[in-house]
Image: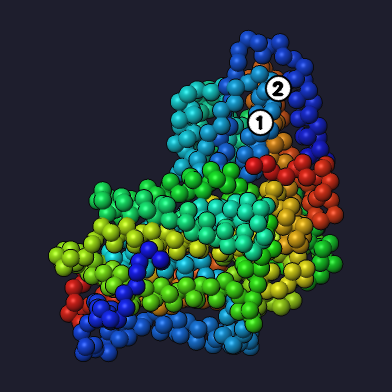
Amino acid sequence: MKKMFAALAALALGATVLTAPAQAQDKKYTIALIPGLTTDGFYITMRKGAQAAADALGVNLVFQGASDFNPVTQVPVLDAVIAKKPDAILIAPTDKVQLVEPLRKANDAGIPVITVDTFIGTGVYQTGAGDADFPLAYIASDNVLGGEIAARALATAIGDKGKVYVSNVKPGVSTTDQREEGFKKEMANHPGITVLETQFNDDDANKAASQLQAVFARNPDLVGVFGANLFSALGAANGVKQAGQTGTVKVVAFDAPTSIVDNINTGLVDVAIAQHPAEIGYYGVVSAYAHLTGHSIPVTIGTGFTIMNKSNIADPNISKYLYSE
Amino acid sequence: MTSTSPVQPAENHVAPQADHGDPARSLISRIAEGRAWLFLAGLIVCFEIWSRLAFGATFVLNPFNLQSIAIFAVAPLLLATGQTFVIISGGIDLSLGFIMGLAAVVAAHATNMAGAAIPLPLAMLAGILASVIVAGVPGVINGLLISRLKVPPFIGTLGMFGVARGAAFLLAGGTTVPVQNSWFALLGNGKFYGVPYLVIITAVFVIIMHYLLSQTRFGQHNYAIGANVQAARRSGIDIRGHILRLYVLSAMCAGLGGALYAARFTAGAAQAGEPLLLDSVAAVVIGGASLFGGSGTIFGTVAGALVIAVIQYGLVFVNVEPFWQFIAVGVVIIISVLIDQAQRRFSGARQDE
């Protein structure tokens, strides 16, 4: 309900901004978007959404980032962006804690900060509590909810009973941690399902595959696996294939690059949970613009999910949520 | 691989491994040389006992486990095979991980493109060939940088690490490239009497590489250069030419690794080999090669790669907290190097320099 309200608020906000272009003629704003990493379909799609909003609003969008998801490489990019004094910064912080001080520099320099996809501190901003509440807004998929959706999809696929586990990247990443949390929370409502210990694969598909085979060897009654990100899911799916269990062990994947279509059609992956990164980018720019033109903006905007499977993947209303290249 | 011409025994040039010419080898040096296999045996026994005590299930007698471990070891082993040659020569190749990623992306694109024009099996071969050849390009540049321009291998290949990474992501458009070729997918996931094709291909390739290293002039030159580059030069070995061929060879090993990755996951991913680079160095070192050059064997590296695979697979199998995997591999590397040092001390050879 809260989510829906936030989304409605965001929509209404988008509408007011779009219908009030008068102030836009005064100044052409520059908004910087710093992704978690540049080489990822998710952020590339987010950029497209942001660009669409920027074009509609007459804003100049700058897209700069590092090639891996790491504070050590992201902070220099952030510093360089701050040095050029954009009117606002949209950023997907690569660490909840390590990005707090670097972002405070931007805030101190009078540049409003909005975090997208990931957050700093607790992700609850403008409360006066803690030292990381200064960003204006957090715009992202609700990853806990995404994990719950994944759990329900998997529970349905396996007939609500059997053993499953989470194939995850590494601990400490806010989004994937939340997906696992949501998954386990929902699975607690399914007494017939046992969730085995989580396996961490360092984003290495080879390792994720081997882990699936090891877990399966120990638990021949394994019926499902939730891949908390793309490589976790593809690796686990390959492990299922190598074990000759395609169809028996169901695979739910998080994220939906275009290659997921093949994976779903060939039965490698049973269900994919797509986030809406374009929506995140779009509302990021719209929110920043609203703030710059003197409007208030919601502190949290939760964007949606789309569940993809063999029966709906051909539908253009579903496949439009695939991440573009 | 084909860039060198194996010299037949007629030349009377063939000798066992250069660094171990001493006929009266002590027991300790024998143990030290075979330590990777001893480790492997020890590990398997440990996991077998653990598994039987904790779950009443067998670990090593379960063919599914063996198959899974073998498949797991394929990619790191292919990188480690090239790395073995480089490390024996006294160098190191840090670019292998991303050359593998580049090759995986090229294999995916080339297979798809060729598949539109020619029958699928031929398209598959074209894709593999293209990826191995393209992988050779950064190898040539590495080789030229190191042999002609005297760039230290660590730095030269570190630069190429970045170049290959960027090129791979550019080619892939920042995402993974799906492969549409049923033959290619079969190659990556099919089995021949229960043995995955990937394992068969890798085994054949590794045996060829073993022959190249232990039985040919190229291999002997490699040991000679690694043991003492000045002596090798004065004895008339073409060091420049050798180094160039060496880095092309290691890049092509990574290229094959990338092609097989694309076959297995039916997708080319630029970051495919990134996590494998350090595993490849670890496999070579556990396998008994010295980072100072001059010693090491391909079969040692095979054992090294299997040790890593068995630890990582086994700890999941017996359901241990995942972070112990890192500690376990780290401990094995340290023990392995300690044995190497001890052996050098006992056998009176140089310890370090």
> Which quadrant, please, contains the C terminus of chain B?
bottom left
Residue assigned mark 2: A56
Residue name at image x 58 percent, y 53 percent:
B110
Taking the image as drawn, is residue A68 in sight?
no
Which residue has dot 1 on it? A50
Query: Callout 2, which amino acid?
Result: Ala
Crowd around label 2: few <14 · some 14–19 · many ≥20 (10 Å): few
Which image quadrant for residue A241?
Answer: bottom right
Residue at mark 1: chain: A
Q: Is residue B340 left or right of residue A37?
A: left
Residue A258 location in percent, x, y?
69, 48
Q: Quadrant of residue A294?
A: top right
Residue B58 drawn at (x, y percent) = 61, 87
Contact between marks 2 and 1 (CB within 8 A): the answer is no
For the residues labelled 2 and 1, the Cα–Cα distance comes to: 10 Å
User: Label 1: few (<14), some or many (≥20) within 10 Å?
Assistant: many
Residue A226: % across, % down: 70, 61
Please name the amino acid that badge 1 sits on: Ala
Question: Which of B194/A32 is in front?
Answer: B194
In the picture, the disc for residue A259 is none
Quadrant of the snapshot with the N terminus of chain B: bottom left
The colour scheme is rainbow
Q: Residue at x 75, y 20 (%)?
A: A18
Residue at 56 percent across and 64 percent down: it is: B260
Q: Specify the subunit that label 2 lies on.
A: A
Horizontal side of A205 relative to A195 (left or right) equals: left
